[in-house]
Image (tube, grey):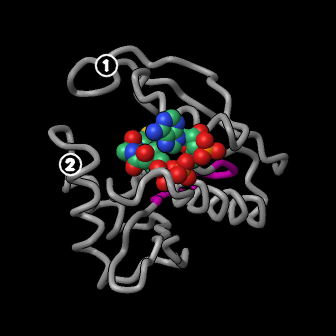
Amino acid sequence: MISVVVRDYRPSDYRDILEIDKEAFAPQSAAYDMYIYLTYGSDVLVADAGRKVVGYVASMEMGSEAKIMSIAVKREFRGLGIGNRLLDEIIKRCREKGKSQLFLEVRVSNNIAQQLYKKKGFEIIDVIPAYYNDGEDAYVMALNLGGQ
Ligand SMILES: CC(C)(COP(=O)(O)OP(=O)(O)OC[C@H]1O[C@@H](n2cnc3c(N)ncnc32)[C@H](O)[C@@H]1OP(=O)(O)O)[C@@H](O)C(=O)NCCC(=O)NCCS
């Protein structure tokens, strides 16, 4: 079993994260978006496997709420509980900050990610038609954190 530490992003993680992002979201990947997340104000947590980073979650505070901008795990490390751990940590931090809700958008076809979010208590609260560049709809999913 691989041992992974979830920790805050450091600038030296940048290349690993861009690589994970490209692998996870190509051909729709948007390195520019990642650049924005990493450079301006978003909270990024990484899963550090020792020699490299194998997953990340980027979130942003939006008033009393927080939004998950992106989450991905390197393909060969999926199914090992890393996505789960990244989400646990971001949820814990949002609770500590007193956030009322954590939300995100996910492709309606992305059953694996939806399963993960549902397992954490997220519920589908809305659908945004043609949210993605290729015309696919998005579900908005939200987790009530009880803060205000
Ligand atoms: C979504 C993603 C981050 C999950 O990361 P992961 O480390 O593989 O997830 P975990 O191993 O922690 O699995 C957590 C849960 O996800 C679901 N899941 C994971 N792999 C799955 C699979 N192959 N089939 C169905 N459900 C799956 C399960 O509910 C699982 O819980 P379980 O192990 O108790 O059954 C990863 O699949 C990924 O990077 N996908 C590509 C990028 C992406 O789609 N990001 C989400 C954009 S909104």
> What residue appears at the point 32 percent right and 17 percent down from the top-left corner?
130
> What residue appears at the point 50 percent right and 17 percent down from the top-left corner?
127
Does dot 2 land on a helix, a strand or a loop? loop
Q: How far apart are labels 2 and 1 at the CA level?
A: 16 Å
Q: Residues within 10 Å of mark 2 (few under 14, many from 20)?
A: few
Amino acid type for the residue under numbered disc 1: Glu
Reading the image, the residue beneath label 1 is 136
Q: Where residue 86 sits in the image (x, y, percent)?
A: 56, 61
Query: Looking at the rendering, which quadrant does residue 61 occupy?
Result: bottom right
The numbered disc on residue 56 is none
Does dot 1 land on a helix, a strand or a loop? loop
Query: Looking at the rendering, which quadrant does residue 17 occupy?
Result: bottom left
The numbered disc on residue 30 is 2
In the rendered image, residue 63 lying in the magenta stretch gets the answer yes
In the depicted structure, whether residue 74 falls above or below residue 28:
below
Q: Where residue 46 sits in the image (x, y, percent)?
A: 46, 71
Amino acid type for the residue under numbered disc 2: Ala
Q: What range of the chain is rendered magenta?
A: 57-65
Q: In this view, does 113 lie to the left or right of 142?
A: left
